Image (cartoon, grey):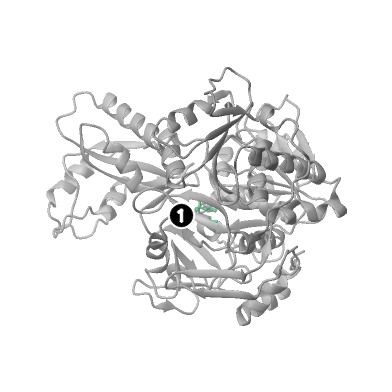
């Protein structure tokens, strides 16, 4: 097992070691795993290209480390707990041995359906155990998984399937979320009708069992396909740098990009960070409420916990069904020890009243975590007081899809804590602040652009099918540094506080959205000439989506127009990207070179119109008044 740090002194010592001799440090962690063949070199890198290789020429299979190696020591320990959407339905558990057998059966099912090493398999599924099982089954045979969050639209799904030329889609019939029963297979059918020629097979898991259309020779039921499959499946030998998975995420420009993670480094880093941040102890029950459609679910529901031999839980439902006590009910029911959620969920539950957590016995809890967006002080204090009884440690974990694992965070109960501050970087993580010219800002009590100046094992390797884009987006802004897109502040003691994105990415309820993506969707409307989308502070979601829209003619029925625009965004991306506010305008403030002045639009959307700065140099300064006047409250 990777090292588990036990005190602040030890953290300081280990951190110093990890910076002085990163290769030695990471080799020590990596040696605790099962490798088929050892690596010949720990690290080979050049940020300029970028080229990053960890544990060069090492051979392994990550599932042997998640499953096989635990069989002897903890075969009968619960590996996975699944809590269904409907609390009256029975929950399910899998021991390490059962999970191993299910993964092997699913792996044999994939092979029987033509999936080989290197093939891409797309997932579009609710939070059911079969998702975890099939993801691991891919990894077992060296197929590359590309999980798409099941809230995305058919269009968005089709884009992702095409980008990765997926050979198979695995989905469910329906998704039960709260009181809703959402068709899932139907969305896959619609996506596949959009020219996803690479897809040969669709495996459909029966979840709710309602009527589902199946296409002959393409669609097969999971339960039929898995019938009779053997409970053992030899794991395919992978190179450290073979692709483990692709996960799409939004950036400032263009369509979402497929972030690529590879086997060796991702394995070492997710396990190490999991054990240290959450201070997981043998026998603990750990629960991360994220969806596996996002990176948090990949790294901290599936891989990190299973690599560490933990008991990990997945939850199918929503925090408010059947009522706002659901999270706390689950904590009580399963005696949860580590609880990891998003600020948006904390704010939503906080708004529903302090009495909800009081109905439940939360004494099993030892560690609270948050992820995905900056946590405001009020939510942090509520979490600490109402859930943590004022005493439990909170780990505010900063990281990204691209970083693969947690980068800046306290180690629970060990590191100093400060509301709204993520804290210190994890061992092996060399963060820095730079100014706009790329010059490193030294010393404490400073603010700047957050960069990472040395490779870490789980870092992004490329963007699928477009290496140049990876270079350009992350490695070209500042020489020899990975640029995160976030701004941050370092306090007097060197602790980091993440301020938020400095690019055109907005973070809505912890979900990343590119403003350009939403604009492209809005511009699909036949009566739209141009649009500009910005984020604004939102009490529950963190950021809301504000769209300024220029129509090509006078809009007679604005309510109907707004409804159409929201429907288009839902169709193109999904309901999570629906603008909260839409303002019809006759023009947008632009520079003389024709660039939209988003800074001004952001201020107006935030209701902060006092400090707009000098607008006289704009191409159309008169428009600012009009936009201000019509701003939506
Ligand atoms: C933001 C999620 C403040 C940040 C794991 C980052 C955070 C983006 C935090 C990545 C945090 C994530 N405090 N901001 N603890 N965690 N962010 O790729 O802006 O979905 O760049 O990964 O979320 O979002 P992503």
Image location (x, y in percent) of residue 429: 58, 70
The answer as to whether callout 1 falls within 8 Å of ligand 1 is: no
- Give the residue at mark 1: 464
Q: Note whether residue 606 is visible.
A: no
- The one nearer the camera, 621 or 107, is 107
Residue 559's quadrant in the figure?
top left
Vertical side of 614 occupied by 29: above or below? below
Q: Secondary structure at mark 1?
A: loop
- The one nearer the camera, 366 or 507, is 507
Image location (x, y in percent) of residue 190: 43, 28
Q: Is residue 13 left or right of residue 172?
A: right
Image location (x, y in percent) of residue 148: 51, 41
> Which residue is drawn at the image coordinates 84% and 46% (left, top)?
77
Residue 557's quadrant in the figure?
top left
Q: Is residue 80 left or right of residue 151?
A: right
- Is the N terminus in the top left, top right, bottom left or bottom right quadrant? bottom right
Residue at far top of view: 211
Label 1 Cα neighbours within 10 Å, binned few <14 / some 14-19 / many ≥20: many
Residue 128's quadrant in the figure?
top right
Vertical side of 540 occupied by 84: above or below? above
- Is the C terminus in the top left, top right, bottom left or bottom right quadrant? top left
Vertical side of 407 occupied by 141: above or below? above
> Which residue is drawn at the image coordinates 69% and 38% (left, top)?
328
Image location (x, y in percent) of residue 7: 74, 70
Count the labels in the image. 1
Q: Note whether residue 450 is visible.
A: yes
């Amino acid at each position: 097992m990777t090292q588990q740090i036990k005190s602040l002194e030890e953290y300081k010592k280990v951190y110093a070691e990890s910076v002085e001799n990163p290769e030695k440090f990471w080799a020590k962690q990596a040696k605790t795993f099962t490798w088929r063949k050892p690596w010949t070199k720990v690290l080979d890198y050049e940020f300029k290209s970028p080229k990053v290789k960890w544990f060069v020429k090492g051979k392994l299979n990550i599932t042997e480390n998640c499953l096989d190696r635990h069989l002897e020591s903890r075969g009968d320990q619960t590996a996975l707990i699944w809590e269904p959407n409907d609390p009256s339905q029975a929950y399910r558990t899998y021991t390490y041995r059962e999970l191993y057998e299910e993964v092997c059966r699913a792996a044999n099912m994939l092979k029987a359906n033509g999936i080989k090493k290197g093939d891409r398999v797309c997932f579009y599924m609710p939070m059911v155990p079969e998702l975890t099982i099939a993801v691991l089954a891919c990894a077992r045979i060296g197929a590359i998984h590309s999980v798409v969050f099941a809230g995305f639209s058919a269009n968005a799904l089709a884009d992702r399937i095409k980008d990765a030329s997926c050979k198979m889609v695995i989905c469910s019939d329906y998704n039960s979320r709260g009181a809703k029963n959402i068709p899932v297979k139907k969305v896959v059918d619609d996506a596949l009708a959009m020219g996803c020629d690479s897809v040969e097979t669709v495996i459909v898991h029966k979840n709710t069992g309602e009527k589902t259309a199946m296409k002959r020779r393409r669609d097969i039921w999971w339960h039929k396909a898995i019938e009779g499959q053997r409970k053992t499946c030899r794991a395919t030998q992978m190179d450290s740098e073979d692709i483990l998975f692709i996960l799409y995420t939004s950036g400032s420009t263009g369509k979402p990009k497929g972030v690529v993670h590879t086997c060796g480094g991702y394995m070492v880093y997710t396990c190490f960070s999991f054990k240290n941040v959450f201070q997981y102890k043998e026998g603990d029950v750990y629960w991360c409420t994220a969806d596996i459609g996002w990176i948090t679910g990949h790294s901290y529901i599936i891989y990190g916990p299973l690599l560490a031999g933990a008991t990990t839980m997945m939850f199918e439902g929503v925090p408010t069904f059947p009522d706002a006590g659901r999270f706390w009910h689950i904590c009580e029911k399963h005696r949860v020890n580590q609880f990891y959620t998003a600020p948006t969920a904390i704010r939503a539950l906080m708004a529903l009243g302090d009495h909800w957590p009081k109905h439940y016995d939360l004494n099993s809890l030892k560690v609270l975590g948050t992820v995905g967006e900056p946590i405001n002080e009020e939510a942090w204090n509520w979490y600490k007081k109402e859930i943590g009884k004022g005493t439990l440690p909170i780990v505010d974990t900063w990281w990204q899809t691209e970083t693969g694992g947690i980068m800046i965070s306290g180690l629970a109960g060990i590191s100093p804590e400060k509301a709204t501050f993520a804290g210190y970087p994890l061992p092996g993580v060399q963060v820095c602040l730079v100014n706009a010219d790329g010059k490193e800002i030294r010393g404490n009590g400073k603010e700047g652009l957050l960069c990472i100046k040395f490779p870490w094992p789980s870092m992004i390797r490329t963007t699928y099918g477009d290496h140049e884009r990876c270079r350009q987006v992350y490695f070209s802004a500042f020489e020899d540094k990975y640029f995160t897109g976030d701004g941050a502040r370092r306090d007097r003691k060197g602790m980091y506080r993440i301020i938020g994105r400095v690019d055109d990415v907005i973070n809505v309820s912890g979900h990343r959205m590119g403003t350009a993506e939403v604009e492209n969707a809005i511009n699909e409307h036949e009566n739209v000439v141009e649009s500009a989308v910005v984020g604004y502070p939102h009490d529950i979601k963190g950021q809301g989506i504000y769209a300024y829209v220029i129509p090509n003619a006078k809009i007679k029925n604005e309510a109907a127009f707004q409804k159409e625009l929201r429907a288009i965004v839902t169709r193109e991306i999904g309901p999570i990207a629906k603008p909260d506010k839409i303002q019809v305008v006759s023009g947008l403030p632009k520079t003389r070179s024709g660039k939209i002045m988003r800074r001004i639009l952001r201020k107006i959307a935030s209701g902060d119109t006092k400090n707009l700065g000098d607008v006289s140099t704009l191409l159309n300064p008169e428009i600012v008044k009009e936009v201000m006047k019509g701003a939506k409250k």
